[in-house]
Image (spheres, rainbow, N blue to C red):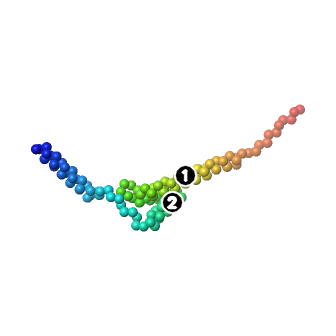
């Protein structure tokens, strides 16, 4: 009989603890999206401007229950990939041009046979 009372008390404490936890910290619902589509577009535009200027601390994302809004993160990552590829192409072009600038034409005179 004592085991039954102990198990019932444990079940009651577990249920009450879960209810209290849910009231204090929430139950993990998704947060509502930004008010309008223009607000989302502003976030994407601000992130694009931050990437273009190299100010990665200015990147902003809408916060949802388990992190950041996935489509905003994906858009920033795609833009960073494209920016990185553009820089890589510029670097390769500079490396191709640089050796041509540094080449010096040397004239070698052959000795005359006497």
Expressed as whole percent of the image width and height from the top left, the position of residue 34 reads 40, 64
Question: Alpha carbon of mark 1 to alpha carbon of mark 2: how far?
Answer: 14 Å
| Residue nearer the viewer, 68 or 52 | 68
What residue lies at 84% left-to-right and 35% top-to-bottom?
A: 111
**CB-based contact (under 8 Å), mark 1 and mark 2:** no
Q: Secondary structure at mark 1?
A: helix
Relative height, residue 75 to residue 5 (above, below): below
Among all residues in the image, which is located at the extreme left?
A: 1
Q: Alpha-carbon neighbours of circle 1 within 10 Å: few (<14), some, or many (≥20)?
A: few
Does 99 sit left or right of 62 as displayed?
right
What residue lies at 51% left-to-right and 60% top-to-bottom?
A: 48
Q: Quadrant of the C terminus?
A: top right
Q: Which label was assigned to residue 51? A: none
- From the image, tell me which residue sits under label 1: 84
Expressed as whole percent of the image width and height from the top left, the position of residue 38 reads 46, 67
Q: Which tag, 1 or 2, sits closer to the chain's start?
A: 2
Does 83 sit left or right of 27 as displayed?
right
What residue lies at 45% left-to-right and 57% top-to-bottom?
A: 71
- From the image, tell me which residue sits under label 2: 48
Expressed as whole percent of the image width and height from the top left, the position of residue 63 reads 39, 58
């Amino acid at each position: 009989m004592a085991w039954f009372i102990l198990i019932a008390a444990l079940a009651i404490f577990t249920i009450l603890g879960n209810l209290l936890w849910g009231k204090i910290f929430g139950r993990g619902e998704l947060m509502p999206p930004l008010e309008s589509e223009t607000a989302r577009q502003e976030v994407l535009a601000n992130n694009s401007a931050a990437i273009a200027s190299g100010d990665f601390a200015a990147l902003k994302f809408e916060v949802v229950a388990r992190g950041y809004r996935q489509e905003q993160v994906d858009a920033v990552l795609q833009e960073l990939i494209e920016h990185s590829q553009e820089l890589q192409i510029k670097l390769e072009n500079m490396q191709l041009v640089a050796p041509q600038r540094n080449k010096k034409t040397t004239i070698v005179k052959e000795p005359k046979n006497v």
